[in-house]
Amino acid sequence: MKIKSILVSQPAPNESSPYTEIARKAKIKIDFRQFIHVAPVDAKELRTQKIDLSQFTGIIFTSKNAIDHYFRIAEEMRFSVPDSMRYICQSEAVANYLQKHIIYRKRKISFGEKNFADLLPLFKKYPTEKYLLPSSDINNEDIEKTLDAANLDWTRAIMYRTVCSDLTDIAINDYDMLVFFSPQGIKSLTENFPDYKQNDTKVAVFGATTQAAAEQIGLTIDVMAPNKETPSMTMAIERYIRNSYK
């Protein structure tokens, strides 16, 4: 079966995206739709978690979303973040994003390489801070294991939630391939289309957890990334399309 149309469960990228090149070369239609979105937790709900922002001397940021929602809720609670606050960020890109909310050069900011485990040397360097971890409602066991291994005084605060978008206006069966990047995207598919049947539709997934979620609801995986041959989803899709024409 040749692929003529693809639905990617993410927001539309910029014009220079590899997806644009795939669509042009293979002469196929590629649509984008956000299957999940972030919803804020308000100050009232945060208080039910017994979180007092003034009790923390350090913050651990794993994403730009975490940064935005921390400062949003701090403003909502009329909490003035002290200049003495220590910021530990998962990557340099996340750290640089802090400039949206604070004067960067006057703050105590450190960051890792990429993975959360890369932060261990920083936690060992600053072990006495009382850390807050702003996060979504989706639990990440690897992060918790790393923090516990570092013997830190830390508290998780759920400041935003990942929720399913309304996709009922989509003719889901019109697409030859569906592309997923998270278990939450798979969940959104089942919530929006409870009677969905894969039939001849090809399914592409990114990551082992997404693969597991897809297989759990009975989907057959046709395209898998990342791997040695295709480290990105666009490379994996391009390879699959190329092979389908042979």
Image (tube, grey):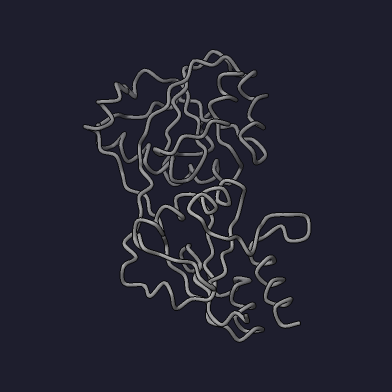
Pick the residue in front: 157 or 221.
Answer: 221
Q: Establish if 37 lies above or below 121.
A: below
Q: How many marks?
A: 0
Residue at 45 percent across and 55 percent down: it is 185
Residue at the image point whose x is 47% and y is 70% from the top = 32
* Residue 83: x %, y % from top left: 43, 27
Residue 79 point in image, percent of width and height: 29, 29
Residue farthest to the left, as pictured? 44
Residue at the location (52% across, 54% down)? 214
Q: Nearer the viewer, residue 181 or 215?
A: 215
Q: Position of residue 9 (x, y in %)?
A: 47, 63
Quarter of image, res 137: top left
Q: Quadrant of the C terminus?
A: bottom right
Task: Determine the image quadrant of residue 16.
Answer: bottom right
Residue sitting nearer the eye, 227 or 65: 227
Lateral position of residue 89 relative to residue 84, left or right? right
Q: Quadrant of the N terminus?
A: bottom right
Picture layout, residue 130 above or below residue 36: above
Can you give x and y, in whole percent of width and height, for residue 55 in the image? 36, 17
Give the residue displayed 29% in from the left and 39% down from the top. 41
